[in-house]
Image (spheres, rainbow, N blue to C red):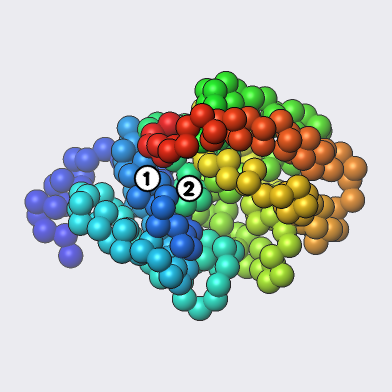
């Protein structure tokens, strides 16, 4: 029951025009990066509604680090959840999305470093009520010429949109958000991928498309991420890229145009790997601070 003062304050306070944004971070053995990730999520021009870290039975100090951050930043809504029923990104991601209470559910990786205006840009992306999900480019913070790399990443993603004839706007797991109502619409049909053969973010994109839910590419919605995938061997990287094809097959999609992302992403492997090797040689102790 509202008190008289509370009722007056509730009546006098204008309704917020901007949606609240939750940030969900699945984590497994991420003690080396989780502090930077959560700190970047805290220091936003517009505060997040909540920052949810879902620990998936980590064997290192991931959970302890998040607990320490809760003590250091009591004014921030940092929530530490534990998903201990099964190992894997998808059940851990789902657990976090199910527990988020914001209007918009952001999802990033534990090695993501959000730009300071990320929450603000997410709110702008969803100002159009027809937009149900959004994604943006990334800046590789452990690569040389980072700002140039951001522009290149943006151009590649826009090229992929064009090559897919704008039929599919693909979400990117390191930098994505969707309305909570959109998640509630697709959560029961998303693939579990027990064999870990698919791209879980592409799977989300395809389920959104199947429900006629609009995905928006928003260039100003920028997240930093590590280029550590380039440390994979060519064989492992090829298997990673071929997750696209396996995801399409799971959805019975056979359009040749959608194979373009596989070709483009694999084509940048060798030049990007060379740049990363040169960068690592020149800077043996890489500072993982802001972007």
Indicate the quadrant where residue 290 lies: top left
Q: At which x and y percent is residue 15?
A: 31, 40
Identify the residue position indicated by label 1 in the image. Answer: 36
Identify the residue position indicated by label 2 in the image. Answer: 111
Q: Nearer the viewer, residue 86 or 125?
A: 86
Label 1: few (<14), some (14–19) or many (≥20) C-alpha neighbours in 10 Å: some
Asked if one can make out residue 221 in the rendered structure from this viewpoint, the answer is no
Q: Nearer the viewer, residue 136 or 146?
A: 146
Residue at (16% x, 60% y) in the render: 2
Which comes sooner in the sequence, label 2 or label 1?
A: 1
Report the Cα–Cα distance between label 2 and label 1.
8 Å
In the picture provided, is 163 more to the left or to the right than 65?
Answer: right
Label 2: few (<14), some (14–19) or many (≥20) C-alpha neighbours in 10 Å: many
Q: Which mark is residue 108?
A: none
Residue furthest to the bottom in view is 85
Q: At which x and y percent is residue 206?
A: 72, 52
Q: Nearer the viewer, residue 11 or 141?
A: 141
Quadrant the C terminus occupies = top left
Quadrant the N terminus occupies = bottom left
Residue at (80% x, 57% y) in the render: 246
In the picture provided, is 265 more to the left or to the right than 72?
Answer: right
Residue at (53% x, 61% y) in the render: 93
């Amino acid at each position: 029951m509202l008190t008289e003062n509370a009722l007056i304050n509730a009546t006098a306070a204008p309704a917020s025009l901007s949606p609240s944004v939750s940030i969900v971070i699945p984590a497994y053995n991420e003690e080396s990066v989780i502090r930077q990730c959560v700190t970047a999520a805290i220091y936003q021009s517009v505060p997040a509604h909540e920052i949810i870290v879902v620990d998936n039975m980590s064997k290192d100090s991931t959970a302890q680090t998040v607990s320490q951050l809760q003590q250091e930043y009591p004014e921030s809504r940092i929530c530490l959840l534990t998903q201990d029923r099964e190992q894997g990104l998808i059940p851990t991601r789902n657990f976090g999305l199910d527990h988020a209470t914001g209007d918009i559910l952001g999802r990033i990786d534990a090695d993501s470093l959000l730009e300071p205006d990320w929450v603000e840009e997410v709110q702008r992306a969803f100002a159009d009520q027809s937009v149900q999900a959004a994604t943006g480019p990334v800046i590789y913070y452990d690569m040389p010429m980072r700002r140039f790399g951001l522009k290149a990443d943006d151009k590649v993603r826009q090229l992929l949109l064009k090559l897919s004839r704008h039929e599919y706007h693909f979400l990117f797991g390191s930098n994505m958000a969707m309305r909570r109502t959109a998640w509630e619409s697709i959560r029961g049909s998303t693939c579990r991928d027990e064999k870990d053969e698919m791209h879980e973010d592409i799977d989300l994109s395809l389920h959104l498309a199947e429900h006629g839910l609009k995905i928006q590419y928003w260039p100003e919605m920028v997240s930093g991420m590590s280029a550590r995938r380039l440390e994979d061997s060519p064989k492992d990287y090829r298997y990673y890229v071929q997750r696209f094809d396996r995801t399409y097959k799971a959805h019975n999609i056979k359009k040749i145009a959608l194979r373009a992302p596989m070709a483009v992403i694999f084509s940048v492997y060798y030049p990007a790997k060379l740049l990363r090797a040169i960068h690592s040689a020149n800077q043996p102790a890489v500072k993982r601070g802001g972007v």
